Amino acid sequence: MRVVILGSGRGSNAEAILQAQQEGRLGRARVVHLFADKPEARLLELGPRFGVPAAFVDPAPFKTKLEGAGEERFIAAVRACEPDLVVLAGFMRVLKPGFLTAFAGKIINLHPSLLPAFPGLDGIGQAFRAGVKETGCTVHYVTLEVDAGEIIAQASVPLEPGDTLESLAQKVHAAEHELLPRVIAELSVPRG
Ligand code: GAR
């Protein structure tokens, strides 16, 4: 299963996926390319470290969505990789019908809350401020409606007395780093 990862920043989840691949924990999945929509994204540094091609693709003209010329550039770049799965690992742009149709049913996203709770930006901060007893992370298929596609798997994280936003964020990220590679591995193995 050929996997393409899209991200915008730190790339800790892309790193967890590549680490899992290196350790033989990614099933039949293989990461074939990393793409970022920001030239300074640390995600791109993972390419040389793990021996996987990594590139910036210009997402202009829009700031928060992928549409128009930027969408066309992303479609062409990703299509050239012939992916079976496109993983959004911290890709902070809303996808539009052009990209969604080009890779229909093959795009999954990681979100830092137990969807349908706290969609949109800052899922961890939203949950912390709401004072919930537990939050977590979700991997789901991507559809036109943001953070609303079919849920594939979730991991929960309890909020404990004394938790700060920082300690909670750390726990959610740790859960993400375990969940996302596991889901990719599971998707790569045909069910009998
Ligand atoms: C992750 O926490 C991911 O859940 C979140 O961005 C972070 C990326 O971290 N994604 C979203 O909020 C999507 N709406 P990373 O760059 O270190 O993998």
Image (cartoon, rainbow, N blue to C red):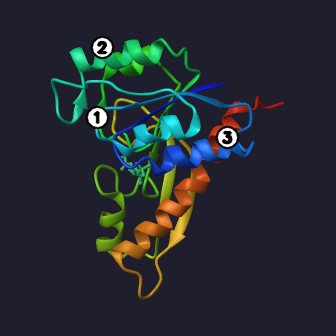
Image height check: is 20 above or below 63? below
| Residue 74: quarter of image | top left
Residue at 16% across / 28% down in the picture?
A: 62
Residue assigned mark 3: 21
Residue at 52% across / 69% down in the picture?
A: 157
Q: Residues within 10 Å of mark 1 (few under 14, many from 20)?
A: some
Looking at the rendered structure, the secondary structure element under dot 2 is helix
Residue assigned mark 2: 72
Residue 18, image x, y percentages: 59, 42
Q: Nearer the viewer, mark 2 or mark 3?
A: 3
Residue assigned mark 1: 39
Left or right: where 11 falls relative to 71 = right
Image height check: is 2 above or below 93? above
Q: Amino acid at mark 3?
A: Gln
Q: Nearer the viewer, residue 45 or 178?
A: 45
Q: Residues within 10 Å of mark 3 (few under 14, many from 20)?
A: some
Residue at 41% across / 16% down in the picture?
A: 77
Q: CA distance from mark 1 to mark 2?
A: 18 Å
Q: Is residue 140 visible?
A: yes
Q: CA distance from mark 3 to mark 1?
A: 25 Å
| Residue 24: quarter of image | top right
